[in-house]
Amino acid sequence: MRAHSVGRLGLSLIGFFALVQALVIFPYLATWGIELLRGNQSPVLVVLTTILPFALLILLGVVLVTNPDRIARALAQGEGEGDREIPVVSVEIAQVLFAATGVLIFAGAIPDLFRGAVTALRGAQDLRFQALAGAVARALLGVVLFFRPRAVLDFWRRTQPGGDAEPGRDGTA
């Protein structure tokens, strides 16, 4: 099995987080864009403030998830150092990274969950089910990443080129 670097794992997690954030902010951006169009704002302004941030997050996420090796190598190389080895991450560190990402995602979902719960309990008409569903999805994702980092790591390995689900004999991911 091929060893995975800290940079590769970290960049993949950051890319995954960018994709999650893009899906979370999409309802807000779409609503904002509709309001701008109703207010007779310039279509260029609508594109710059709604579609562009969403597209940039999606692009960032896709690039980081699909090409973490190339980007990690580029970041690891200093001026004039040539091609050097990238440090390998152990299974334990990889699991801690996944668990930490789960905590960050869950913590980001908590305010939206409470806001949605309070709005639902008041019986308010302005309850946005899209925002509440996004918060629930983020909270569930955070819980899975925190409590099941080994299963997520095994899944991540299977999706990487040349990866498999078993760690190497030396304990590297």
Image (cartoon, rainbow, N blue to C red):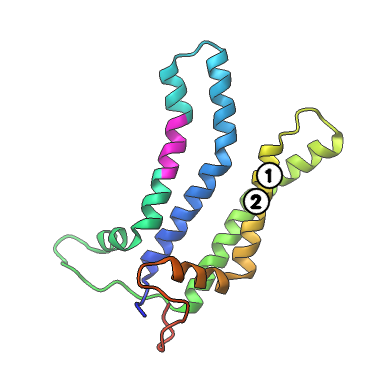
Q: Is residue 25 left or right of residue 80?
A: right
Q: Which residue is mark 2?
A: 137
- Looking at this view, name the residue that lies furthest to the left: 80
Query: Residue 104: percent from the left, percent from the top?
Result: 58, 56
Q: Secondary structure at mark 2?
A: helix
Q: Tag 2: Cα neighbours inside 10 Å, few (<14), some, or many (≥20)? A: some
Name the image quarter holding the C terminus: bottom left
Q: Amino acid at mark 2?
A: Ala
Q: Main secondary structure of the magenta part?
A: helix
Query: Residue 130: percent from the left, percent from the top?
Result: 67, 38
Q: Is residue 35 left or right of residue 3?
A: right
Q: Tag 1: Cα neighbours inside 10 Å, few (<14), some, or many (≥20)? A: some
Name the image quarter holding the N terminus: bottom left
On screen, 78 above or below 113? below
Q: Are marks 1 and 2 in contact (CB under 8 Å)?
A: yes
In magenta stretch: residue 18: no
Query: Residue 18: percent from the left, percent from the top?
Result: 47, 49
- Who's the residue at 44% across and 66% down the image? 159
Of residues 76 and 123, the one nearer the viewer is 123
On screen, 43 above or below 31? above
Q: CA distance from mark 1 to mark 2?
A: 6 Å
- Looking at this view, name the residue that lies furthest to the top: 40
Of residues 80 and 96, the one nearer the viewer is 96
Q: Which residue is mark 1?
A: 133
Q: Secondary structure at mark 1?
A: helix
Q: Which residues are magenta?
A: 51-58
- Who's the residue at 59% across and 61% down the image? 102
Q: Amino acid at mark 1?
A: Ala
- Who's the residue at 44% across and 44% down the image? 58
Residue 75 lies in quadrant: bottom left
- Who's the residue at 40% across and 19% down the image? 44
